[in-house]
Image (cartoon, grey):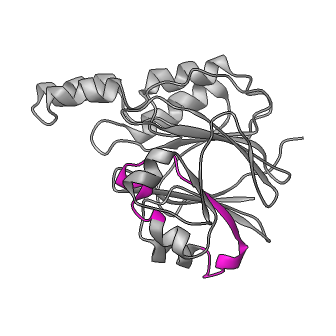
Amino acid sequence: MELKVLGSSSSGNCYILETEKEALIIEAGINFMNVKKALNFQLRKVVGCLISHRHNDHAKYIKNVVDSGIYTIALEEVLTAKDVKGSRVKSITLGKGYKFGNFKVVPFPANHDVPCVGFLIDHPESGRIMFLTDSCVCEYTFPGLNHVLIECNYHDKKLIENIRNGKTMEAQRNRLLNSHMELNTCKEFLSSNDLSGVGNIVLLHLSNDNSDELLFVSEIQRLTGKEVYAARPGLNIELSKML
Protein backbone atom coordinates (compact mmCIF):
# COMPACT_ATOMS: atom_id res chain seq x y z
CA MET A 1 0.00 0.00 0.00
CA GLU A 2 1.17 3.52 -0.77
CA LEU A 3 0.65 6.56 1.43
CA LYS A 4 0.39 9.77 -0.58
CA VAL A 5 0.62 13.05 1.31
CA LEU A 6 -1.17 15.86 -0.50
CA GLY A 7 -1.14 18.34 2.38
CA SER A 8 -0.23 18.30 6.07
CA SER A 9 -0.38 21.80 7.54
CA SER A 10 -2.71 24.64 8.43
CA SER A 11 -2.83 25.39 4.69
CA GLY A 12 -4.67 22.13 4.06
CA ASN A 13 -4.60 18.45 4.95
CA CYS A 14 -5.23 15.39 2.81
CA TYR A 15 -3.78 11.88 2.65
CA ILE A 16 -4.49 8.93 0.38
CA LEU A 17 -3.99 5.26 1.24
CA GLU A 18 -3.85 3.50 -2.12
CA THR A 19 -3.49 -0.06 -3.37
CA GLU A 20 -3.66 -1.29 -6.93
CA LYS A 21 -7.43 -1.73 -6.69
CA GLU A 22 -8.72 0.71 -4.07
CA ALA A 23 -8.03 3.96 -2.28
CA LEU A 24 -9.11 5.65 0.96
CA ILE A 25 -8.97 9.43 1.37
CA ILE A 26 -8.28 10.91 4.81
CA GLU A 27 -9.24 14.59 5.22
CA ALA A 28 -10.64 16.97 2.60
CA GLY A 29 -8.69 20.15 3.25
CA ILE A 30 -7.14 20.72 -0.19
CA ASN A 31 -8.66 21.54 -3.56
CA PHE A 32 -10.44 18.43 -4.77
CA MET A 33 -8.95 18.77 -8.26
CA ASN A 34 -5.54 18.08 -6.72
CA VAL A 35 -6.95 14.95 -5.09
CA LYS A 36 -8.30 13.75 -8.43
CA LYS A 37 -4.94 14.37 -10.08
CA ALA A 38 -3.16 12.37 -7.35
CA LEU A 39 -5.55 9.50 -8.09
CA ASN A 40 -4.94 9.82 -11.85
CA PHE A 41 -8.66 10.63 -12.05
CA GLN A 42 -9.52 7.04 -11.09
CA LEU A 43 -12.29 8.04 -8.68
CA ARG A 44 -13.99 4.67 -9.08
CA LYS A 45 -11.25 3.06 -7.00
CA VAL A 46 -11.97 5.38 -4.04
CA VAL A 47 -13.92 3.35 -1.47
CA GLY A 48 -14.37 6.16 1.07
CA CYS A 49 -13.25 9.35 2.78
CA LEU A 50 -12.63 10.02 6.48
CA ILE A 51 -12.88 13.51 8.02
CA SER A 52 -11.49 14.18 11.50
CA HIS A 53 -13.18 17.53 12.32
CA ARG A 54 -14.81 20.66 10.90
CA HIS A 55 -11.88 23.07 10.53
CA ASN A 56 -11.41 24.14 6.93
CA ASP A 57 -7.86 22.83 6.63
CA HIS A 58 -9.40 19.37 7.11
CA ALA A 59 -12.97 19.64 5.80
CA LYS A 60 -13.26 22.59 3.39
CA TYR A 61 -13.86 20.42 0.32
CA ILE A 62 -16.08 17.75 1.87
CA LYS A 63 -18.99 18.74 -0.40
CA ASN A 64 -16.87 18.18 -3.48
CA VAL A 65 -15.94 14.73 -2.19
CA VAL A 66 -19.54 13.75 -1.46
CA ASP A 67 -20.84 15.25 -4.72
CA SER A 68 -18.34 13.03 -6.55
CA GLY A 69 -20.14 9.99 -5.14
CA ILE A 70 -17.51 9.09 -2.54
CA TYR A 71 -18.92 7.59 0.65
CA THR A 72 -17.77 9.87 3.48
CA ILE A 73 -17.91 9.65 7.27
CA ALA A 74 -17.56 12.61 9.65
CA LEU A 75 -18.84 13.77 13.00
CA GLU A 76 -22.37 15.19 12.97
CA GLU A 77 -20.92 18.60 13.84
CA VAL A 78 -18.91 18.53 10.61
CA LEU A 79 -21.94 17.65 8.50
CA THR A 80 -23.97 20.43 10.11
CA ALA A 81 -21.23 23.06 9.82
CA LYS A 82 -20.58 22.23 6.16
CA ASP A 83 -24.28 21.63 5.35
CA VAL A 84 -23.57 18.19 3.87
CA LYS A 85 -26.43 15.74 3.41
CA GLY A 86 -27.33 12.72 1.33
CA SER A 87 -27.02 8.98 1.03
CA ARG A 88 -23.25 9.12 0.47
CA VAL A 89 -22.46 10.66 3.84
CA LYS A 90 -22.69 9.13 7.31
CA SER A 91 -22.41 10.62 10.78
CA ILE A 92 -19.71 8.94 12.88
CA THR A 93 -20.81 6.97 15.91
CA LEU A 94 -17.90 6.54 18.31
CA GLY A 95 -17.32 2.92 19.24
CA LYS A 96 -18.65 1.71 15.90
CA GLY A 97 -16.53 0.22 13.11
CA TYR A 98 -16.88 1.04 9.41
CA LYS A 99 -15.90 -0.92 6.32
CA PHE A 100 -14.73 0.62 3.03
CA GLY A 101 -13.79 -2.13 0.62
CA ASN A 102 -10.99 -4.00 2.39
CA PHE A 103 -10.37 -1.11 4.78
CA LYS A 104 -11.74 -1.49 8.31
CA VAL A 105 -11.94 1.79 10.24
CA VAL A 106 -12.62 2.50 13.91
CA PRO A 107 -12.84 6.19 14.92
CA PHE A 108 -11.69 7.17 18.42
CA PRO A 109 -11.96 10.49 20.34
CA ALA A 110 -9.22 13.09 19.92
CA ASN A 111 -8.52 16.18 22.05
CA HIS A 112 -8.80 19.36 20.00
CA ASP A 113 -10.56 22.71 20.47
CA VAL A 114 -13.56 21.37 18.53
CA PRO A 115 -14.95 17.81 18.45
CA CYS A 116 -12.40 15.65 16.64
CA VAL A 117 -11.55 12.00 16.03
CA GLY A 118 -8.58 9.86 15.09
CA PHE A 119 -8.83 6.64 13.11
CA LEU A 120 -7.56 3.10 13.54
CA ILE A 121 -7.37 1.64 10.04
CA ASP A 122 -6.81 -2.01 9.14
CA HIS A 123 -6.10 -3.38 5.66
CA PRO A 124 -4.63 -6.74 4.58
CA GLU A 125 -1.79 -5.05 2.66
CA SER A 126 -0.70 -2.56 5.34
CA GLY A 127 -1.77 -4.08 8.62
CA ARG A 128 -2.91 -1.67 11.31
CA ILE A 129 -2.45 2.08 10.84
CA MET A 130 -3.11 4.65 13.55
CA PHE A 131 -3.98 8.14 12.27
CA LEU A 132 -4.21 11.06 14.68
CA THR A 133 -3.95 14.76 13.93
CA ASP A 134 -5.07 17.97 15.66
CA SER A 135 -5.03 16.49 19.14
CA CYS A 136 -3.06 17.77 22.12
CA VAL A 137 -2.85 14.29 23.65
CA CYS A 138 -3.89 10.70 23.00
CA GLU A 139 -5.53 8.93 25.92
CA TYR A 140 -5.31 5.45 24.39
CA THR A 141 -2.80 2.76 23.53
CA PHE A 142 -3.29 0.48 20.54
CA PRO A 143 -2.17 -3.13 20.17
CA GLY A 144 -0.78 -4.57 16.97
CA LEU A 145 0.27 -1.33 15.26
CA ASN A 146 2.15 -1.55 11.96
CA HIS A 147 2.30 2.15 11.03
CA VAL A 148 1.77 5.34 13.02
CA LEU A 149 0.64 8.63 11.46
CA ILE A 150 0.62 11.13 14.31
CA GLU A 151 0.68 14.87 14.81
CA CYS A 152 3.90 16.46 16.02
CA ASN A 153 2.93 20.09 15.62
CA TYR A 154 5.37 22.16 17.69
CA HIS A 155 8.23 22.25 20.17
CA ASP A 156 7.42 24.25 23.29
CA LYS A 157 11.00 25.52 23.55
CA LYS A 158 10.86 27.00 20.06
CA LEU A 159 7.37 28.38 20.67
CA ILE A 160 8.54 30.22 23.79
CA GLU A 161 11.51 31.62 21.86
CA ASN A 162 9.17 32.90 19.16
CA ILE A 163 6.95 34.54 21.79
CA ARG A 164 9.96 36.28 23.36
CA ASN A 165 11.09 37.45 19.93
CA GLY A 166 7.63 38.79 19.12
CA LYS A 167 7.16 36.36 16.25
CA THR A 168 4.25 34.54 17.93
CA MET A 169 1.55 35.95 20.19
CA GLU A 170 1.55 34.65 23.77
CA ALA A 171 -2.13 33.67 23.48
CA GLN A 172 -1.12 31.20 20.79
CA ARG A 173 0.70 29.07 23.36
CA ASN A 174 -2.45 28.61 25.45
CA ARG A 175 -4.38 27.57 22.35
CA LEU A 176 -1.72 25.10 21.23
CA LEU A 177 -1.49 23.51 24.68
CA ASN A 178 -5.14 22.49 24.36
CA SER A 179 -5.40 21.75 20.67
CA HIS A 180 -2.18 20.43 19.09
CA MET A 181 0.45 17.85 19.97
CA GLU A 182 3.86 18.97 21.19
CA LEU A 183 7.05 17.01 20.45
CA ASN A 184 7.43 15.60 23.97
CA THR A 185 3.77 14.58 24.12
CA CYS A 186 4.22 12.75 20.82
CA LYS A 187 7.27 10.99 22.25
CA GLU A 188 5.32 10.00 25.37
CA PHE A 189 2.56 8.48 23.26
CA LEU A 190 5.02 6.49 21.17
CA SER A 191 6.82 5.29 24.30
CA SER A 192 3.57 4.03 25.82
CA ASN A 193 2.72 1.82 22.83
CA ASP A 194 4.22 -1.46 21.67
CA LEU A 195 6.04 -0.50 18.46
CA SER A 196 7.64 -3.88 17.83
CA GLY A 197 5.51 -4.42 14.71
CA VAL A 198 5.75 -0.84 13.44
CA GLY A 199 7.49 -0.18 10.13
CA ASN A 200 6.96 3.55 9.66
CA ILE A 201 6.18 6.61 11.76
CA VAL A 202 4.92 9.67 9.90
CA LEU A 203 4.82 13.00 11.73
CA LEU A 204 1.83 15.10 10.72
CA HIS A 205 0.87 18.77 10.70
CA LEU A 206 4.20 20.36 11.65
CA SER A 207 3.85 24.06 12.44
CA ASN A 208 5.48 26.43 9.96
CA ASP A 209 6.95 28.59 12.74
CA ASN A 210 7.12 26.48 15.89
CA SER A 211 8.53 23.17 14.66
CA ASP A 212 11.92 21.87 13.55
CA GLU A 213 11.59 19.06 11.01
CA LEU A 214 15.15 17.75 11.26
CA LEU A 215 15.06 17.78 15.06
CA PHE A 216 11.65 16.12 15.22
CA VAL A 217 12.61 13.32 12.84
CA SER A 218 15.95 12.66 14.55
CA GLU A 219 14.43 12.72 18.06
CA ILE A 220 11.69 10.23 17.12
CA GLN A 221 14.16 8.01 15.26
CA ARG A 222 16.46 7.97 18.28
CA LEU A 223 13.55 7.14 20.58
CA THR A 224 11.93 4.40 18.48
CA GLY A 225 14.58 3.04 16.12
CA LYS A 226 11.99 3.21 13.33
CA GLU A 227 11.81 4.80 9.89
CA VAL A 228 10.48 8.31 10.54
CA TYR A 229 9.16 10.83 8.02
CA ALA A 230 7.80 14.36 8.27
CA ALA A 231 4.64 14.63 6.16
CA ARG A 232 4.82 17.17 3.36
CA PRO A 233 3.10 17.46 -0.02
CA GLY A 234 4.58 14.99 -2.48
CA LEU A 235 5.75 12.47 0.13
CA ASN A 236 4.92 8.95 -1.04
CA ILE A 237 5.94 5.98 1.08
CA GLU A 238 5.20 2.28 1.08
CA LEU A 239 3.18 0.96 4.01
CA SER A 240 3.71 -2.79 4.01
CA LYS A 241 2.46 -5.18 6.64
CA MET A 242 5.20 -6.23 9.02
CA LEU A 243 5.47 -10.01 9.35
Q: Which residue does the image show at 50% across and 46% down from the upper left? A: 76
Which quadrant would the C terminus be assigned to in this image? top right
Q: Where is residue 227 in the image (x, y as percent from the top left)?
A: 65, 40
Is residue 153 among the parts visible in the rendering?
yes
The residue lying at 55 percent from left, 18 percent from top is 188
Residue, x 75% and y 68% (percent of image)?
22
The picture places residue 112, in percent across and down from the top left corner, at 41, 32
Q: Quadrant of the N terminus?
A: bottom right
Answer with left or right where residue 26 lies relative to residue 154: right
Residue situated in front as seen by the camera: 180 or 228 = 180
Residue 46 among those drawn in magenta: yes
Give the quarter of the image for residue 164. Answer: top left
Indicate yes or no whether the magenta region holds residue 242: no
In the rendered view, would you say 126 is above or below 157? below
- Foreground residue, 115 or 240? 115
**Residue positioned 68% across, 33% down in the render:** 95
Give the magenta-colored segment's residue range: 39-62
Kindly give the residue lying farthest to the bottom in the view shown. Answer: 41
Q: Would residue 136 be found to the left or right of residue 145 on screen?
A: left
